[in-house]
Image (tube, rainbow, N blue to C red):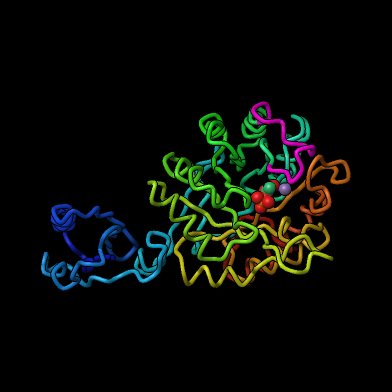
Amino acid sequence: MIVVMKVGSPETEVTRVCEDLKGWGLTPEKIVGKHKVVIGLVGETAALDPFQIQEISPWIESVLRVEQPFKRASREYRHGESSEVVVQTPNGPVVFGEHHPVVLVAGPCSVENEEMIVETARRVKAAGAQLLRGGAYKPRTSPYAFQGHGESALGLLAAARSATGLGIVTEVMDAADLDRLAEVADIIQIGARNMQNFSLLKKVGAQDKPVLLKRGMAATIEDWLMAAEYVLAAGNPNVILCERGIRTFDRQYSRNTLDLAAVPVLRTLTHLPIMVDPSHGTGLAEYVPAMALASVAAGADSLMIEVHPNPKKALSDGPQSLTPERFDSLVPEIAVVGRAVGRWPERQPVLT
Ligand code: PEP
Ligand code: MN
């Protein structure tokens, strides 16, 4: 349920309404939007009478029920306004959100050694990326495949961060690694395979770093938003959703089916920022550029693209990784689409 306060409601009145609602045994959450203040109420609200709540203050404009099962993640919960996730990187704040330029996240699937991660970071930064991705802990289908260098790779990500000032996105698989990982990561990734690892979701929800929640490979949009709800309900409001392709009947010519329709669908359902990962979404480098452009055209707030200095030698996901040269030429192509949809700042590289 949400309580919408009238424009210009005095702060003291909003506080009084919140206190009053606490007296009803509810846990009010004050959400300050661009135009209005909304008070979110989650919990046993079924028996509440909206008209009775309306009586609390003449400054209450309306009291509405959130019909969706995902409450805090729903667009209604913020009264239609989209949220922003601000990531503090050494190069300055990077903002993910509907009303901001497209954010580029790029880097290898796995951190392999210091030279490759620092060099890749330099290259993707020069091309226009704001954040570096790279896995230290890798969720691999086979236990015999490269599992990531683990904790030592976190140190290498820290080195790349200080060499370039890029923010770091890296995946947590085990809650036991979370504290150490959060010292290095500017965004903590929950991979597709852990999207419904509810105890892990509660743990990342109970810490402060923004969370990148990838869509499970067989997850419906509702499953995915309910997973986001776990993180939000645990107290972390900074969640970015990442579409990375789902399993369908056809895996002959591409690794996954990239569900680009999810972008406008999510936009109507949720206020959370939306990222697309065309690398895992297609599984093949030659298809990544087309889907990157399509993602921006569809309204994505961010792209995550795998880039490796030598894809043929990559320890994981080489076939879907772009070379730094291809990433260099892709960014100006993305800029063309980004400008067309009003999502590209002039200061980023553009086609001449
Ligand atoms: C990754 O980002 O390298 C990864 C393993 O992604 P996903 O969880 O989407 O498969
Ligand atoms: Mn990968």
120 lies left or right of 89: right
Q: At x 62% / y 60%, what residue is drawn?
A: 243
Q: Is residue 118 visible?
A: yes
Q: Is residue 128 visible?
A: no
Residue 205, quarter of the rendered image:
top left
Residue 155, quarter of the rendered image:
top right
Query: Is 35 drawn above or below residue 329 in the view shown?
Result: below
Give the image location of residue 154, x and y in percent. Answer: 64, 30
232 lies left or right of 129: left
Q: At x 71% / y 60%, what residue is drawn?
A: 281
In reply to whether residue 152 is colored magenta, the answer given is yes
Give the image location of residue 239, x and y in percent. Answer: 48, 52
The N terminus appears in which quarter of the rendering? bottom left
Classified by dominant secondary structure, the portion drawn in magenta counts as: loop
Q: At x 76% / y 30%, what residue is drawn?
A: 113
Give the image location of residue 21, x and y in percent. Answer: 17, 57
**Residue range (magenta):** 139-153
Which residue occupies the foreground of this view, 326 or 5? 5
277 lies left or right of 8: right
In reply to whether residue 195 is colored magenta, the answer given is no
Which residue occupies the foreground of this view, 227 or 102? 227
